[in-house]
Amino acid sequence: MEETRRSTGSALTFSLGLAALVSVVATVALGLALPSTVEQSDFSRLIAIHPGVAWASYVAFGVTALAGALWLWPRTRRTDWDLLAGASAEVGVVFTGLTLATGSIWGRASWGVWWAWDARLTLSALMFTLLLGYCALRRVPGDPDAVARRSAITGLLAVLVVPVNHFAVEWWRTLHQGRSLLQDIPGNDVDGKFIFAMTLGFVAMTLVYAWLVVHRLRIARLEAGIDADDLDAAIEARRREAVPA
Amino acid sequence: MSRRLGVVLFVIVGALGFLVVKGLGDATTYFKNADEVERNGKPLPSLLGKRIRLQGTVVAGSVHETGSSVRFVVEYRCVSVPVHHVGGQPSLFKQGIPVVLEGRFARGSTTFESDRIIVKHTEEYKTKESDRLAAAARESQGCAR
């Protein structure tokens, strides 16, 4: 067998990785340069990081659901969609975990508590549990088509939590502040700096997410390829046994 | 359906169930506003002795530190509730800001006994003191005392 070191890197991942690195550094630099605010003093600067990380976790849910749907739809069914759904969910675990971690740190600083059982925080914990559950479900062995089908359906059900969590801060009384995205902000040049830093954070975290997902998808493809190779080898061996020498 | 699938589903559903129950019981109404906990200057009888979360804005000039405790008044929609807090204070605690307090009304008292102050901030990111305190003062003056 040929000994080659197969890499998941390519021109695409290099460009994505570089863009992600540059935008993350820019986000952190811009975030640190933000002025302190009346309400939260220096802690406001976390707006550069936390909403972007949370956004990436929403994207992860969306991509997992969409890829699952594309697998379920007979005309677009390809193993790649299933692998993409799995890759996105795993990267989503990282971003949802980071959302909880950065949120907790911000909460301790601003609110004075690490955690509160309000609707936004509870639903974010629910998102984390859903993704972990989804990944656990994917690892339950079985017929590949059956695993892909149950994963796709789970992903489509799980994504429903995203709009609920997005609007949770308006539907219910929460400790968490109102929506950061798509809120009605009175035009104010100071607010503008914060919106810009937050938007840059969205871009940066989306790039990091994309970079990780492409790598993870390629690893999944290699794993699937190896499985297929093993199967081919096994079939070949049986065949040789069956054929009288 | 394998045994392992069953175990995985059981654990997932259990964890989700815990969060949903926790959420339904607590999260949808994280706090009561000051105007919802009392009538005619007296705490609602149904709340006496019960642990609740109370939300209101700390009235300017009402904060008085007394040794290990602090007394102040919170207000929401012109209904004010006196508070006696024992315990730590978050670094951002000051007058004129909305807070959520955890504690209870003791029987026979109109003062809310708080043991935890949580600072509640909004999605406002303003760098100037602007007229925030003035606005809070105006709001308070609009209330008949």
Image (cartoon, coloured by chain):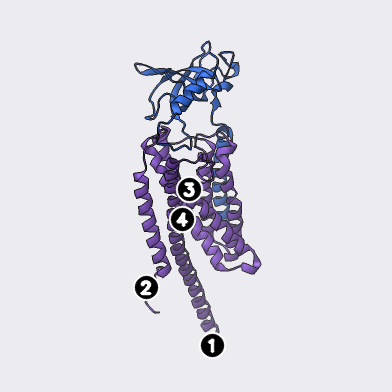
Kindly report which numbered mark, 3 or 1, lies closer to the viewer in this rendering: 3
Q: Which residue is denoted by mark 3 in the rendering?
A: A54
Q: Report the number of numbered marks.
A: 4
Contact? badges 2 and 4 (CB < 8 Å): no
Kindly report which numbered mark, 4 or 1, lies closer to the viewer in this rendering: 4
**Mark 3–mark 2 distance (CA, rounded to whole Å):** 35 Å
Disc 2 sits on a residue from what chain?
Answer: A
Q: Is residue B127 above or below residue B107?
A: below
Disc 4 sits on a residue from what chain?
Answer: A
Residue A162 in view, yes or no? yes
Q: Earlier in the sequence, mark 4 or mark 3?
A: 3
Contact? badges 3 and 2 (CB < 8 Å): no
Kindly report which numbered mark, 2 or 4, lies closer to the viewer in this rendering: 4
Q: Colour of chain A?
A: purple
Q: Which residue is denoted by mark 1 in the rendering?
A: A244
Q: Which residue is denoted by mark 2 in the rendering?
A: A5
Residue A206, numbered label: 4
